[in-house]
Each structure stands twice: as structure tokens, then as C-alpha cells.
Image (cartoon, grey):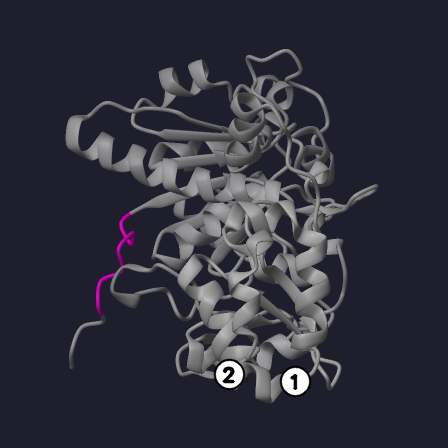
Amino acid sequence: MTAPARLPLEDVTVVALEQAVAAPLATRQLADLGARVIKVERPDGGDFARGYDRAVHGGSSAFVWLNRGKESVELDLKDPGRRAALDRMLERADVLVANLAPAALTRLGLGVGTLRRRHPALVVCRISGYAPDGPQPEKKAYDALIQAEAGVMSLTGTPGAPAKTGISIADIAAGSYAFSGILAALRHRDATGEVLPVQVSLFDCLTEWMAHPLYHTLYGGTAPVPMGTSHPAIAPYGAYATADGASLLIAVQNEREWARLCSGVLEAPALAAEPRFRSNSRRVAARSSLEAELAPRIGAYTAAELTARLDAAGIAWGRLTELADLPSHPELCRAGRWLETPTEHGTVRTLFPPGAPGGRVEESGAVPALGQHTASVLAELHLAEEDR
């Protein structure tokens, strides 16, 4: 019998003091690549993301998304005896990931300096809303609040009607940077013996994502404005209605494409030669006039007719997909895009993670019930469950 293929991180053990989105996303990605992730949860309900909703056969859709492949251990870390069990876990771990408040971690004796002395080989990744050494380390930092503080809402929505994004981008950014930072720290430790901490703040991660408009404003002197589906620096680039009521996003990137759109798609070659529209910068400056010319011409075609013409002309386009239609998108219907994932409420389909080296992931990972692995993990530590 052929031995199962080795997973990239199967020799890595992670202890997670986590809740909500950012840290659980980082550790789930580690678990997907084979790491053992022991999720330490408080006894009175555990990770509060478990209670966000009951949409997935009675379980939380957020928790299913973020906790595949982990083990759940209930520990009251305010109890000295049970707190000692955590130290036993950390003695055997490679990584600690925590997104509790900095002050809470310090009260628990889990400050970076203390951990370095007790567990010198442990990579410690802390995720917080703002930098622990900054001016507001304890400021509450939910995702939408960070979107507002980092300027995202100034670019999202339409003029006079700012909006947050429909997903938790600050949390997702932080979880992604934590994941890559942990991998880099592990490689550095294994190559040199030096153990570097990883510190991630939601605000820093989202301002990194805002760097393009930030630099444009800082050095160009003018700030981009929210434009709905349009692009602030490219035209035409946005959503258009078709004759049969569909909505397609059309994106023109250069002058060759602009000429092909006018001639090959819209059969209006004179439009390409119009002085007001002869370059992208001119089209951006005359955006209202441009839209007045394009909208009726594009709206004369059905979606099927228009997409065939766009494809023939090599013009990029995309459907505005309703969320209910996303599972039937052709890209999600191809083989290997879904995993069958056990949960305490039954088996569900979850998305195969992107970017796995060689496509190797832990395909049998389950979403744990609260405290499901407490007895087995404590037994490994030679502790009885009643002593935790």
C-alpha cells in the first residue's frame, strides 16, 4: 500500500488562543497544510463565532469557514491549575497564535518576553486591532471600525454614501499576513535557530491594502472618490445594463482595447476617434459624456450577444454574480473545488483552499465541537480531565 503523501506542515504543532475571524483564519490555513492546531476555548461557550448564526445545519457559517481541521480544548485560563495545562501544551508546540487583547495576554503571563523566557523555541504570533506599542493598544477594533479608520469607507460605495465592504477585509488581511509571517518565522527558526516574533495589527494590514490610493493622495494631491463599480483612474471600466436586464462589468485597459470595443463590439468606430475620448486620461476627465455614449449602445444587446462580441474582440468582462448563484459558477463546478467536511451537525461542503503546494491539503479535516478533544489532549499531557 502506498503511503499517503506528506503534507507540508505535518510536523508543526500550533496552539491557538483565538476567536472571531483574523487568528482563526491564519490557523485554519496552517491546519489545511497539515499542521496540528489545538484551539483553546473558554468553557462558557468557547469562541464566540460559534454563535454568530445557525445557518449550516444548525452550526455557525463563520465557524465552519474558519475552523476546519482543528482540535478544540476547553480550558479556563483564569484557573491556575488549568493555566498550567496551557504551559504543558506550549512546551510541545512550535507556534502560539493569539488574538486576545494585549492586556489580557499580559495578565495571563503570555507577554512576548515571558513566553520567550519560558519557551525559547516557540514562534509567537499576536494579532491585535492596533499596534501594542502604539498610542491606542486597547482600543476596540472590530472589522467595520478598522475599515472606517483606515479610509476604506471613503472609497467604497458612492459619493455621499460611504459603505463598508460586504466581507471582513480587515480580519482577512490580518489573518493572511499572520499566516505568511508564521511560515517565514518557522523557516527562519529552522534555518538559523533564531526565533522571531510575529506581530500583526488589523489597522496596519488594511492601511497596507490602502497604499495605492494613499500614495496617490499623498503625492498627487487629490484623493480618489467612491465610484460604485467604476474605476477612479480607468474608463470605461464599470457595470452596464444589457437589453435583457443583466448587468455586466466591462473593463478596458489600453487604447487598443478601446478601439476594439468601439469598432468590433459596438460598431461605432467614430467613437474611438472622438477627441474627448482619444486617451484614457481624456476619457476619465469626460466620464459623464463617455457613459452617455456607451450606455445606450451597450444596452442594445442582450447579455449573450454582448459577451460573444466582447470575447471575439478580446475585451475583459465579468458577470455581477448574485451570491445565491455563486456555487453554480463554472469555476466552482470544476473537479476538486470542494471538500466534504464533517461537523457536529453533519457533513458539509467547504471550499478547497487556494495556493496549497502541489495541491496537498488535509482533506479529512473536521470542524470540532466545543471541547471535543479536551480529554485526548490532556491525556497526552499526562493530565486527567478532572484536573484541568
What's the residue type where badge 2 is placed? Arg
Examine the rendered structure and indicate whether residue 210 appears above or below residue 270. Answer: above
State the CA–CA distance, disc 2 to disc 1.
10 Å
Quadrant in the picture for the N terminus: bottom left
Which circle marks residue 309 in the picture? 2
Which residue shows up at 66% across the image and 87% down it? 302
Disc 2 to disc 1: CB gap under 8 Å:
yes
Quadrant in the picture for the C terminus: top right
Label 1 crowd bin: few (<14), some (14–19), many (20+), radius 10 Å: some
**Image location of residue 329, percent across then percent down:** 55, 79
* First to last magenta residue range: 5-11
Q: Is residue 106 magenta?
A: no
Query: Is 168 in front, or is 39?
Result: 168
Question: How many numbered marks have been drawn onto this rendered protein structure?
Answer: 2
Examine the rendered structure and indicate whether residue 281 appears above or below residue 308. Answer: above
Q: Is residue 337 left or right of residue 220?
A: left
Which circle marks residue 301 in the picture? 1
Q: Is residue 302 left or right of residue 22?
A: right
Query: Is 196 in front, or is 300?
Result: 300
Which residue shows up at 65% across the image and 57% down it? 62
Query: Is 160 in front, or is 50?
Result: 160
